[in-house]
Amino acid sequence: MPAEGWGNCPSWHERLAAALRLCFSAPVRLAGLRAFLFVILLAGAAVARAQGPLPSGVEPETPVHLSADRLVRDESGVVEAEGNVRLMAGTLHLGADRVRYDPEAQSAELSGSVTLVDGEYVARAATARIDLAERTGVFEHAALFQKRDPVDPDAILAARDVEDVRRAGHNELEIHAERVARLADGSYAASQPSVTTCDCGDHPPDWRIGASEARLSTKDRLSLSWPVLYARGVPIFAAPYLSIPVTDERRSGLLFAVPHITGRRGASYEQPVYIVLGHSYDMTVSAGYYTGHQISLSDRGRSEKADVFQGPRGSLEFRYTPRVGTAGRAFVAYGYDLSKTDNQVPGAAPSRYAIQADHIDDWGGHFSDRLALNLVSDRDYIRDFVDDIVLRGEQTLRSTAWVGYRKGAVLGVAEGSFLQDLRPAFGPEVTAPPEGFQETLRLFGAGARNTFQRVPAVAMDVARIEGPLGSGLSLHLGAARFAPWTSAAFGDVGLDGLGPGDFGYPGPDTGEGDHIFERGGKDGSIPGEIPRATRLSIRPTASWPLLAGRYLSLTPYAGWREQLYQYGPTGADTGVAGWGLFGAAAHTELARTFSNGVRHAWIPKAELRRLWPGHVRNAPLQLPSQIYDELDILPLRATTQSRLSLASQLEVPGPGGGLIAIEAEAGQNFILAPSPYIAEGFATATARLWPVQLAGLAQWDPHRGQITEAVAEASISDRRGDQLRGNYRRLAVGASSRLLAGPDELFSDLYFTETFRPPVLQELEQIGAGATVVPFPWLTLSYDLLFLPDLPSAKLLQQRASVGLRSACDCWAGAFHFGKRRDEGLDFWVSFNLGRI
């Protein structure tokens, strides 16, 4: 039998208990015998104190317990224990095949399957030396685990090997080392360790960090000296020092820095630092340096070369989520461009910066607010710091802010917008600016170019208020102020109505840049400058849905639009425009559901709309450079439009409760008056047929015999992650009637030349294709391209490729990325992510 209770030694306590039973139960009442037994009792207590003192640091009321299959105590008081040895002292639980315990020195030497359990810390070693008084120890050939939660000591002590210890509970940290020491402050130190924070369950982690030394603090932070990161045994990163948190709790510290080599900016390196500011706040501060590069400006209508940013750059990103419904992000970047310090670029400044902010807040009580701020210091900032060639083509940065109240069908909003014009002064059709023409690149400060801003604006929208007999009323009431941010702004463009960035801009003309906003002609009937304006919009629409049993839905409607304008700083000059519309929309549905759950429906639709110009006086011209926004698009002649279409829906129950669905619609637009003709036709389709996804749209003009707009997207995927994808987009000269339609039109009246038409001057065609292949669970290969057939040269606009590696249990993921863009060198960068670091 195992003997238990070191500190109450079996060699004397059994004899003592027998004596006590004899004393108080046997018919012996002699005082001398009782005195004798009392002396034995005192002697036994003295022996207990001598042989089993409680170690310092262990609570006095908590004894030290030792159990084993075999216990032997020698003359010096040292106890030898063998077989299933268990030693407990306070929160320390120790197990081994053999233990040598010295009560005088309060130390223990353990060997054979040595196991330590101390709360969430667990260790397994070949041998160990423990000082129970100081609660310190040294473990040889050890594995140390930090568990997410405290574990059951009995289960860990019964583990057969280190793999059983690893699989018992979730591991926040795993350290294997030649030697692991438990220090007096409760921290652990390891020499020549191999470390990982990845827990793959039954599978061993496939990444680790080797180091010369490691220190695990009581604050759950691991510090490594001369660490080397290995992925699948391959070294991929080294540093002189690394400090990482080992729990899911956010901790401040350095983040992994990844160098970039791009054909646009040259080589760069940025080092980010993560800072925890509180439970719901944190920030990332980065500092780096860009070597710079020289690029061609052929994509911006110029043939010369230009220097892209060279020099130091820093950034700060602040994130917050203080409560449910409130969240935001603010980002600021500043760089000092050494390539702009010689003043070779007119209007350029070396200080370059960007400001971004996104905020969302639901106040409760039906109130909420939103903010989206996007500002840059100069018109070339996006060109220099955005790598995606499509995003780089953005011509305007838009910032908006609004506060709204929504209750039922009513939405009230107070908002404003700020635009930054990023276009070059001369478009691709102009090879050189006029002699002596110079324009600043700066978007802030004296002489900076701005677009018109809508600050402030208020609006109330009523989606639908139910009236008698099922009738309803929808309404828009809005007021907005349009004005340039500075007096020498983009609106001051002269009598031709064209300013920097407009297609066909010939350079400055009469009245341009004189700080006076002159309307073209006495009543604004010819092109000219767009003046400051305050606009009031009133747009009511009444409708009355009618049902003819279950066979037909008919909804007649009628509305009126009234626009009131006050121009200039004084508002003495006014304008007005009003027009009406009425019409009716009808549809029905022929559907059938089959016994196997398949449902199919035909949905015929028809709509008729009449647009009536009411009155127009001194209203904005229907030209791209003259109207303020889409609400100013008005009909200039009475027009009757109609649309006929047929839609089809097919729904098929899929495996696992999913749904296979196909939706398609084809239709034709008609002008019925004043000059009847067949307008554009259209078709749309979407299909979800696992593993295939399809979507498409087409607009065609029977008179011109061409497709005016086409969009097609397709992909085929499997559950492993392999995918083929492609997309096609085409836009004819002048665009399609769908894109040009104002908010009151079914479609744009393309053959009435006085209506608003954006400047789409050439045919646009774009082809995109890509593939992702996963030949092995740990390897992903990807390639995408963007092709423009209409370009005279360098038709392959952009290519991207990546080789991705991933661990079996998502403990780490890394990728090598490559990019090649027209007229630019090869880009190369690396991304790497360690699970929970």
Image (cartoon, rainbow, N blue to C red):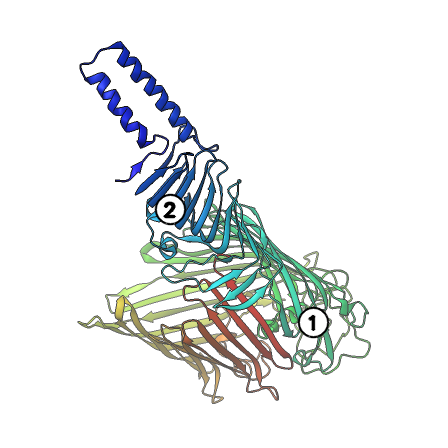
The dot on residue 98 is 2
The mark lying in front, picked from 1 and 2, is 2
Can you identify the residue that label 1 sits on? 528
Along the horizontal axis of the image, is 209 left or right of 89? right
- Between 444 and 739, the one nearer to me in the picture: 444
Left or right, 79 with respect to 417, comes to: left
- Asked whether residue 564 is in view, the answer is yes
Q: Nearer the viewer, residue 421 or 281?
A: 281
SS for dot 2: strand
Q: Position of residue 69 (x, y in %)?
A: 30, 43
Residue farthest toward the top in the current orientation of the protein: 31
Decide which of 762, 483 is in the foreground and name it. 762
> With 566 as the anchor, is 835 left or right in this view?
left
Q: Which quarter of the figure has residue 658?
A: bottom left
Q: Is 676 on the left or on the right of 273, as rendered?
A: left
Measuring 67% from the left and 71% from the top, which residue is drawn there?
267
Disc sitting over residue 466 in the figure: none
- Compared with residue 518, is residue 770 higher up or lower down, i.e. above or below? below
The type of residue carrying mark 1 is: Gly
